[in-house]
Image (spheres, grey):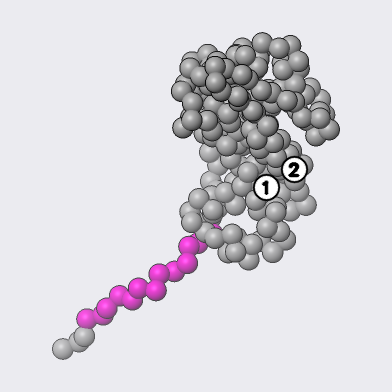
């Protein structure tokens, strides 16, 4: 995997972190995430391993104050090895980093946040592998590999309240896993530019009957 692939868009980082895009941007705008954890060049991108800190910041909100959480992130990030670790999340599969902070009477352990980040990053990696953007297929619209099913159509159907079962019935070539990966990809990769017209499955017809007037 190229080093650039470890850089995530804010939408991708939000998916891996289990938060919203605005939450990722907030930690950057308010300088809660150290500058080594993201880049602000042509576009804002976050090192994949940094999502563990984003998870920690929001996941520990009920137990720790905001200053305590920022302090913990700052302490861990003072080490050069931490900067290397967030840029090479692929190495976590063989050896996960061990981040711990002692502060006053507190002992903070980042293991759970690291494990959850790796799990979600693996899902994103599988989603990327399952989706193709080919100019010869629907003009480059993201579709599930081997099909002509646009991922954003699946996402639009799910957002309209269509069940996974109905989506699977409408697209027999899709497994439950492919539907899940399509939904994840659509969330991590919003449509660029002017939104295209997405197609949704028609919701189930209402069983409500309209009473007719009786003729005199």
* 177 vs 105: above or below: below
Lower position in the chain sequence, tag 2 or tag 1: 2
Q: In the picture, residue 163 is in which quadrant?
A: bottom right
Q: Would you say 91 lies left or right of 69 here?
A: right
Q: Residues within 10 Å of mark 2 (few under 14, many from 20)?
A: some
The residue that mark 2 highlights is 126
Q: Is residue 215 left or right of residue 4?
A: left
Secondary structure, mark 2, is helix
Decide which of 78, 10 is in the foreground and name it. 78
Quickly name the residue at label 1.
181
For the residue pair 171 and 65, the one nearer the viewer reads as 65
Indicate whether residue 211 is drawn in magenta.
yes
User: Is 206 situated left or right of 122 in this image?
Assistant: left
| Residue 120 can be seen, yes or no | yes
Query: What residue appears at the point 33 percent right and 76 percent down from the top-left corner?
Result: 209
Does the magenta-highlighted stretch encompass residue 205? yes
Locate the N terminus and report the quarter of the image it occupies: top right
Q: Could you tell me which secondary element the residue under label 1 belongs to? A: helix
Q: Position of residue 84 (x, y in %)?
A: 76, 17
Instruction: Report the span colored magenta.
Output: 201-213
Q: Indicate whether 208 appears above or below 39.
A: below
What percent of the width, then of the height, locates residue 203?
48, 62
Residue at the far bottom in the pictured view = 216
Question: Residue at 72% across / 16% down in the picture?
Answer: 83
Q: Are marks 2 and 1 in contact (CB under 8 Å)?
A: yes
Quadrant containing the C terminus in the rendered view: bottom left
Residue positioned 73% across, 39% down in the render: 122
Q: Position of residue 4 (x, y in %)?
A: 75, 22
């Amino acid at each position: 995997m190229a080093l650039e692939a470890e850089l995530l868009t804010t939408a991708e980082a939000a998916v891996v972190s289990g938060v919203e895009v605005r939450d990722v941007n907030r930690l950057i705008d308010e300088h809660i995430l150290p500058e080594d954890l993201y880049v602000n060049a042509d576009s804002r991108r976050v090192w994949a391993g940094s999502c563990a800190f984003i998870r920690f910041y929001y996941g520990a909100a009920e137990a720790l104050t905001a200053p305590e959480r920022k302090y913990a992130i700052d302490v861990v990030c003072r080490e050069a090895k931490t900067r290397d670790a967030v840029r090479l999340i692929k190495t976590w599969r063989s050896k996960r980093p061990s981040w711990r902070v002692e502060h006053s009477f507190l002992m903070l352990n980042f293991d759970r946040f690291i494990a959850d980040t790796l799990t979600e990053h693996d899902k994103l990696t599988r989603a990327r592998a399952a989706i193709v953007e080919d100019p010869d297929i629907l003009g480059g619209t993201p579709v599930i590999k081997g099909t002509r099913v646009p991922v954003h159509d699946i996402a639009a159907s799910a957002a309209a309240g269509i069940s996974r079962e109905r989506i699977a019935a409408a697209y027999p070539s899709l497994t439950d896993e492919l539907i899940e990966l399509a939904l994840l990809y659509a969330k991590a990769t919003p449509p660029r530019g002017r939104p295209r017209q997405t197609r949704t499955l028609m919701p189930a017809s209402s069983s409500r009957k309209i009473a007719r007037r009786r003729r005199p």
